[in-house]
Image: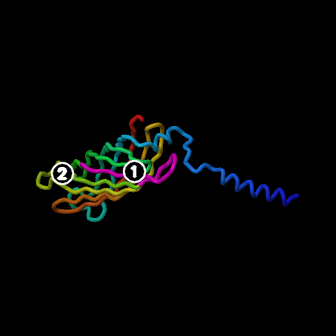
Amino acid sequence: MKTYVSILLFLGSFLEIIAQPQENIVTLQRLNYDQAPGFMSITELSGGPGIGLTDAPYARYCFGITSVAGYQFTRNIKAGGGSGLHFHNEGTFLPVFLDARFSLNASRYVPFFGASGGLAFNLSDPEDRTWIYINPSVGIRWVVADRRSASFSAGLMTMSGKINRNSYINFRLGIELKGKK
């Protein structure tokens, strides 16, 4: 008798596994909306210390605010263009950049890889006006409510101008808003 009960329980556990749905069923409305394509806006506060040679102009630290307007193409891919202001120890920059993000499959907490790059215009020094700006990062996004999520990421921001190249460990804290369906 014990053998029959054991076999039934064993087979019952396999039936539960086989009976699981093959598609991802989202139980919360906010998670369902987070996976849908649509327009989005990401606003982030960023900052961090310089690394390497920090005696050069603009190399000691940076902090700023940026905003990206873009589109979520699939559950995992987002892209857009952005601008903002970065304040450095000896000047102010206006970055104009493209931003792309790849999210891993998750539910409430979504890990992602991001990359942004473009031009940063030096507003403080007309002789050294245009810098190249790149910022790869890795982070996590928390789906807070319908059409709203918060994110935290860390990366390596590098800016290269006419005279020197500066690098920073960059931390970003942001909020993402999505348009209505």
**Bounds of the magenta segment:** 96-112
Query: Amino acid type of disc 2?
Result: Asn
Report whether 140 appears left or right of 48: right
Percent position of residue 136, x then y: 34, 57
Image quadrant where residue 167 sits: bottom left
Residue farthest left in this picture? 127
Percent position of residue 98, x then y: 28, 50
Give the main secondary structure of the magenta stretch. strand
First of labels 1, 2 by sequence position: 1
Label annotation for residue 122: 2
Badge 1: few (under 14), some or many (20 or more) residues near its Cα, within 10 Å?
some
Q: Which residue does the image show at 50% across and 41% down from the upper left?
A: 32
Label annotation for residue 27: none
Percent position of residue 100, x then y: 34, 52
Q: Quadrant of the N terminus?
A: bottom right
SS at circle 1: strand
Query: Amino acid type of disc 1?
Result: Ile
Residue under label 1, please give it. Answer: 77
CA distance separating discs 1 and 2? 31 Å
